[in-house]
Image: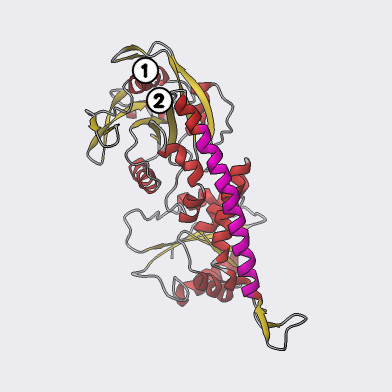
Amino acid sequence: MSSNVSQESTAAPTILVGVDFGSPNFDSGLEELGLLAQTAGMHPLARVTCKRKAPDAALFIGSGKADEIKLLAEMHGATEILFDQSLSPAQQRNLEKHMGVAVNDRTLLILEIFAQRARSHEGKLQVELARLQYVSTRLVRRWSHLERQTGGAGVRGGPGEKQIELDRRMIGEAIKRTKERLHKVKRQRSTQRRQRDRRGAFGISLVGYTNAGKSTLFNALVKARAYTADQLFATLDTTTRQLYLAGAEGPNGAVGRSVSLSDTVGFIRDLPHGLIDAFRATLEEAAEADLLMHIVDAANPAFVEQIAEVQNVLAEIGAADVPQVLVFNKIDALEKDRWPLQMVDTFEIDGLNIPRIFVSARTGEGLPALRQQLGHMAAAGRQQGAEPNEDPAQGKVIV
């Protein structure tokens, strides 16, 4: 067991646990989990990592390692154990009984952060749906009074519903109501998109790993006031503004037109599927866009893995074939000797050479070149660094 203990006291001391099952992307330092925990208002006071060939069916980490973590929690007064992987309902229940403190996993942590960050009516509905779907699988965790209840008046003897069955039915009804409300929001968003299509607006969506600086870049480009902070998932709600590309030269001359620019929720490794499903209405902004501005934190040593994670989510929401331009942000955080030789080049993703531009949203470095690149791509329609092919069946340009 390896641990890194901080002496700083907090109201919610937490122990972080990561299990290496041989994944090449295993975060041995639990850095990202620590950032997530801090974003949710926790204070990680110890980090524990171990290796296993496969999860233990009952305790995920095995009884011996569970005893070690229990002792560490008692020594440092931890009130919660946080796992970097998803736990099954039974594993979560068994670990809590074994350790005597609250045990949660990465999925619940991300849900908690999303619940704190959601501001719009749509965002709150999306988070509520994901939370209800998560809780519905874990009712067994919290209930110790599962004896069968007596039937109500007018019932001839016979047992009534178990408490857990009542809860499951109530949650099921709440999920149904929330889905219906989200469906209405989805229809409204589709109507808004159709209106933009009728106006011939070229749609650009900002996507990227969380904390890559999307909202900061969005504000720099359109002079908006979207909330920004150096934290994970600083903003969840989609914000759309018009960006005027004045004098950008394209194949048919100067663009001189406005495009629609949308800032969307950030992605992260192992983003819970429930959240992807719940936020599908919002994420469809990316799938329906004419161009994706894929923002990358150039100063993050794991940027290659983060690009791959974003590509995975894009594929899941049906946006894998939308043309992209890569924007390597935060070059101001790099030492000068690590700056690129060329501020505009290409980067290969899945065999395609994608246009890449290095910028600093904070200082403005590279933004004129970015505007020019956006102008070229807006003028060329759906062209993306390769000769487009016409799809006669759909009448669309595909890359």
Q: Residue at x 60, y 49 (%)?
A: 181
The disc, 2 or 1, on the residue closer to the chain's N-terminal end is 2
Of the 4 image quadrants, the one containing the N terminus is bottom left
Judging depth in this view, the residue of 331 and 119 nearest the camera is 119
In the displayed structure, does residue 163 sit left or right of residue 324? Answer: right
Q: Residue at x 48, y 32 (%)?
A: 194
Residue 36: assigned label: none
The residue singled out by tag 2 in the image is: 359
Residue 375 place in picture, x, y as percent:
37, 19
Q: CA distance from mark 2 to mark 1?
A: 13 Å
Residue 305 place in picture, x, y as percent:
34, 45
Residue 202 place in picture, x, y as percent:
42, 25
Residue 377 place in picture, x, y as percent:
33, 23
- The image's colour scheme reads secondary structure
Q: Secondary structure at mark 2?
A: loop
Label 2 or label 1, whichever lies nearer to me, is 1
Which is the main secondary structure of the residues drawn in magenta? Answer: helix
Q: Secondary structure at mark 1?
A: helix
The residue singled out by tag 1 in the image is: 372
Q: Looking at the picture, which amino acid does disc 1 mark?
A: Gln
Residue 376 painted magenta? no
337 lies above or below 169? above
The region drawn magenta spans 164-192
- Seen as rendered, the residue at the extreme bottom is 157
Q: Quadrant of residue 399?
A: top left
